[in-house]
Image (cartoon, helix red, strand yellow):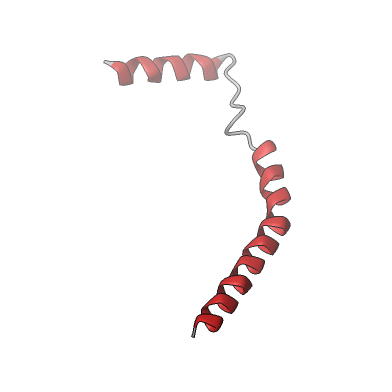
């Protein structure tokens, strides 16, 4: 029974490592290209952002 658990744990670890190697670069690229992190605040967007922030504070 211990050998079965150890074998299953090793297999799961290999699968997790392989998934991380395959999906890691894709996830990093998606985060780097995301517009949510680098939200631009210019012009009318800045005015709207500031007014919404002020309303939420009061």
Give the residue displayed 73% in from the left and 49% down from the top: 25
Which residue is most to the bottom? 1
Up-down relation of residue 52 to residue 25 (above or below) = above
The residue sitting at the front extreme is 2
Snapshot quadrant of residue 43: top right
Residue 26, how many percent across, how many down? 71, 50
Name the residue located 66 percent from the left edge and 67 percent from the top edge: 14
* Left or right of 57, for residue 16: right
**Residue 46 % position (x, y):** 52, 16
Left or right for 52, reference 16: left
Image height of 44 relative to 25, above or below: above
Q: Residue furthest left?
A: 58
Q: How many marks?
A: 0
Question: Is 43 or 35 nearer to us in this picture?
Answer: 35
The answer to whether residue 54 is left or right of residue 45 is left
- The foreground one among 23 and 53 is 23
Task: Give the quarter of the image for residue 51.
Answer: top left
Q: Is residue 44 left or right of residue 54?
A: right
Q: Examine the rendered structure and indicate whether residue 3 appears above or below residue 18.
A: below
Closer to us: 15 or 7 = 7
Residue at image point 59% right, 26% down: 39
* Rendered view: 1 above or below 46: below
Residue name at image x 50 percent, y 81 percent: 2
Q: Indicate the quadrant containing the C terminus: top left, top right, bottom left or bottom right.
A: top left
């Amino acid at each position: 029974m211990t050998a079965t658990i150890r074998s299953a744990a090793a297999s799961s670890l290999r699968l997790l490592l392989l998934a991380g190697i395959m999906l890691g670069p894709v996830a990093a690229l998606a985060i780097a290209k995301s517009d949510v992190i680098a939200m631009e605040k210019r012009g009318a967007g800045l005015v709207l952002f500031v007014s919404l922030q002020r309303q939420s504070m009061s």
